[in-house]
Image (spheres, rainbow, N blue to C red):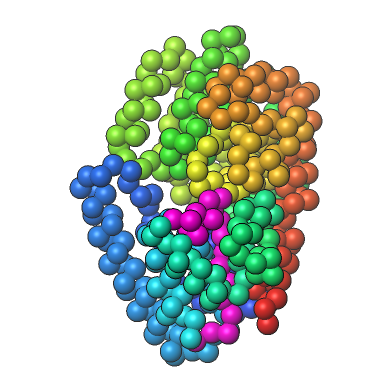
Amino acid sequence: MTIATDTFANLLREEIDIDRIDTSFGRIRPDEIDREWVKYHIFFAGQLVKDYAVLRRRLQQSDYDTFYFVASPSVLGHWRNRVALEIARPYVSRVVAHVHNGNFAQVFEQTGTSRSARRMSDLVDTFVFTSRLLSNRTEGYISASKRTVAPNTIDKQVRCSEATVNAKIKERSREHSLRVLHLSNMIETKGYRDVAEAVEQFNIDGGEATVDFVGDWPSSQARGRFMGQLSQYSHADAMQVHGRITDRERLRHMMLGADVFVLPTYYPNEAQPISIIEMLNAGTPVVATEHAAIPEYVFDDENGYLVGKQSPSQIKRALDALSDRSNWEEKARAARWTYREMFSPEAVQEAMLRAVRETE
């Protein structure tokens, strides 16, 4: 989310002046209620209080037109947004809320936030969604005149040139083995266990595939459980768990080196995973679930394959299909075309500027 916000800010900064307050904490929230969980929430709360003070001071000292924030669907996230919104609204003429979450409608339905969410809807001038499908999910709560769409794009550190992608496709189309990549926060509903099972079955059946798992873990216990799963496999040496990688250049090389990106997510809050857009940019076919906004840009048997949730057998069949290198090459070129047509920085910049300015 931090990278996505940075990317949008940089696009807008080419046309308008922007000041930012970064409220991110620099790590994924722990999922086990233990000492680390308590420490995370104490330090995050302390940082947030300081951020509110900075926000008020900046608003009082400078003349801003618009307040922009990333809207959260969670109870705690919603109230964090509401405090910031109440601080900012008297000082600005416009408020823009950017929704990166596929389950945002729940703030209008939950007991602890429903009334407050309606108040938020009154205070916000424009809600920006990453896809039409996700925008439509809130049509019962937010008027059409306040909803607009701007798809995600990717930061320049991982963008690949046309020549680089063409060279990758030419080189990898001659290879026999498959390099699989799973890049995501290592939340179980992102489907990393299903990826491992599918690669294991693919190799057992005579295929030749390696898989890299890249992403931050919510706890050492979660990582330990996954490593225990891998230890049971006969092809565990083909699976590498990297953890979090912050070097964007290294990630770009991993994207270019991958033959297949697999994200079989059933994460409840999923919206439009930027990791998929990054892979399309690198000419990497995608295997993903028909979940959230994913079917709007992963097209079955065109730039990849759509599979059922929690279905390693369907992922394995997709890997089988992509082991045909002529089929792989066709889908790799389609992946790059999808990125170019739907997610280029130029197209997204225009949509975001329109969203910010349309209430002027």
Examine the rendering and report whether any part of residue 276 can be seen: no
| In the image, residue 331 above or below residue 358 | above
Quadrant housing the C terminus: bottom right
Q: Residue at x 46, y 80 (%)?
A: 88
Does residue 84 appear left or right of residue 278 in this picture? Answer: left
Does residue 351 appear left or right of residue 314 in this picture? Answer: right
Of residues 224 and 283, the one drawn nearer to the viewer in this rendering: 224
The quadrant holding residue 276 is top right
From the top left corner, tell me how far across and down residue 138 is, in percent: 60, 57
From the top left corner, tell me how far across and down residue 268 is, in percent: 50, 43
Of residues 211 and 317, the one drawn nearer to the viewer in this rendering: 317
Which residue is farthest left? 35
| In the image, residue 119 above or below residue 319 | below
Q: Residue at x 32, y 30 (%)?
A: 224
The quadrant holding residue 314 is top right
Q: Residue at x 78, y 23 (%)?
A: 326
Q: What is the magenta range?
A: 91-110
Is residue 280 inside the magenta stretch?
Answer: no
Examine the rendering and report whether any part of residue 234 can be seen: yes
| In the image, residue 301 above or below residue 155 | above
Q: Residue at x 69, y 30 (%)?
A: 305
**Count of numbered badges drawn on the protein:** 0
From the top left corner, tell me how far across and down residue 33 is, in percent: 25, 44
Does residue 56 appear left or right of residue 322 in this picture? Answer: left
Is residue 97 inside the magenta stretch?
Answer: yes
Does residue 151 appear left or right of residue 108 in this picture? Answer: right
From the top left corner, tell me how far across and down residue 3 is, in percent: 52, 57
